[in-house]
Amino acid sequence: MTEITQRRTTWKKLDARVRTILPFSLTVTVLLFGMTPTYVPGLAQITPMYTLVAVYFWAIYRPDLLGYGLGFAIGVLEDLLTGAPLGVGTLVLLLIQWVVFNQHKFFHAKPFVITWFAFGLVAFGAVLLKWVGVGLVSSSGPTPFGDVFASYLITVAVYPIIAWLFSKVRSGLLDEP
Amino acid sequence: MKQPTGQISRLGTFKYLAQRFAFLSLIGLTFALMLIGKADTVIVERVSMAVSDAVTPILRVMAEPAASISKFVTNVQELGAIREQNTDLREINARLLEWQAVAQKLENENRQLRALLGTVNEPEARAVSARVVADYGGAFAQSVLITAGGRDGVAKGQAVVTGEGLTGRVAQAGYRSARVLLITDINSRIPVRVGEAGDRAILTGNNSPRPRLIFLGVKSAISPGDRVVTSGDAGAFPPGLPVGRVVVADESSALIEPFVSRDRLQYVEVLDFGLTGFLADTDGPQ
């Protein structure tokens, strides 16, 4: 009898543990998803920056499950994988978290359209900062801004899709009573 | 559940301070990373390739559906145009047969002349085929991850090609994966020759689909349509690999359209000519 209850609690603990790392693992999944080749002409150039969406979303809705530490880890992972100058993407993600955490009252429990609009603003700052950062750190000068801006627009455009998927996961698995 | 308010506020302050401390120290760490990335590319490369090696199996699986869909779409598209294509191919075939005869004649002649002169044959390339499983970086970097690495003999600096022409070069080689820096990346520099005159130039990537030519000597008349091939200077690449075609040429600059498109990369070949040029040791992707 005690063994069964013990086993049950172990499972419960494991279950809770898996749930707490969901935001992080989902973010890594969309990061990897963004890297898979689509073979659509012209798309590789302007791939959406999925990590901006993911980090922003979790910073608003579950800041307890994706704090600065994990934000840093995601940034380093992305920088290492993409071959972009190390640290620049990481800095951008941390600053997004900082802005959202500090303006929590503004971001929290707002209608979707407002959150989306706010994402547009935050992401623009983030992309601009990344563009300047990459230009400064890389020895070959700045990347053409046109493609970066197109990539920004696509990122804002995919926000509702990712946010919808994440909020399904959130309401189904994370916010249980 | 009610708790004394003092405890809550103390807990709150503590949490706030801890968070603030975490944020500031991580920002500091980020700047340290930037410095390390600039100063010591060897460590960064090693870590980066270890990470790539680890995620390659996952990416390989994730790339499968997109590849299948792409194959299906291409099949359907081709089915529609199959009749026209057939006529075109017949014409091309007839033309190519003529070219083949010319090429054979020239090859024979070439061999005889070489024998007369006693030239040493160029080294034969050893080729490794690999699949492209990830297209990295979006607008900020142009590189792809391939499923061949050190265990297959892939090493830094080797040329990567497809049937169409030069794709890029191996920038980092892990154990089972390697990162290929495309010729369009902002860090890519390839010594090339342009047109029939063979003007020497450096093909410089700028993260846009059309890399720029920087001429080393006097630029003779270069016009749109001129072919660009690798020059083999500095021992970086074997000479004569097709790279692209000049699309814009004016007084100050020339832009080229590469033969290889980033969007259609599915399989590539890594060529090992046994050359260890300057690219192997210097300019990393950072």
Image (cartoon, coloured by chain):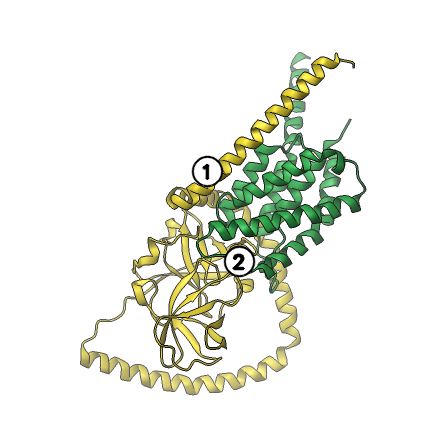
Q: The yellow chain is which one?
A: B
Chain bearing tag 2 is: A
Q: In this view, does B139 lie to the left or right of B11?
A: left
Q: In this view, does A146 lie above or below B32?
A: below
Same subunit: marks 2 and 1: no
Residue at 53% of width from left, 63% of height from top? B208
Indicate the position of residue A72 as horizontal and vertical percent values. 56, 37
Whether residue A8 appears in this view of the structure is no
Q: Distance between the residues labelled 2 and 1?
A: 23 Å
**Residue matched to label 2:** A143
Indicate the position of residue A103 as horizontal and vertical percent values. 71, 35
Q: Is residue A68 left or right of residue B182?
A: right
Q: Are marks 2 and 1 in contact (CB under 8 Å)?
A: no
Q: Is residue B277 left or right of residue B82?
A: left
Indicate the position of residue A161 as horizontal and vertical percent values. 72, 49
- The numbered mark at residue B32 is 1
Whether residue B199 appears in this view of the structure is yes
Chain A drawing hue: green
Label 2 Cα crowd, 10 Å radius (few <14 / some 14-19 / many 20+): many
Amino acid type, mark 2: Thr
Amino acid type, mark 1: Ala
Residue at 70% of width from left, 13% of height from top? B7
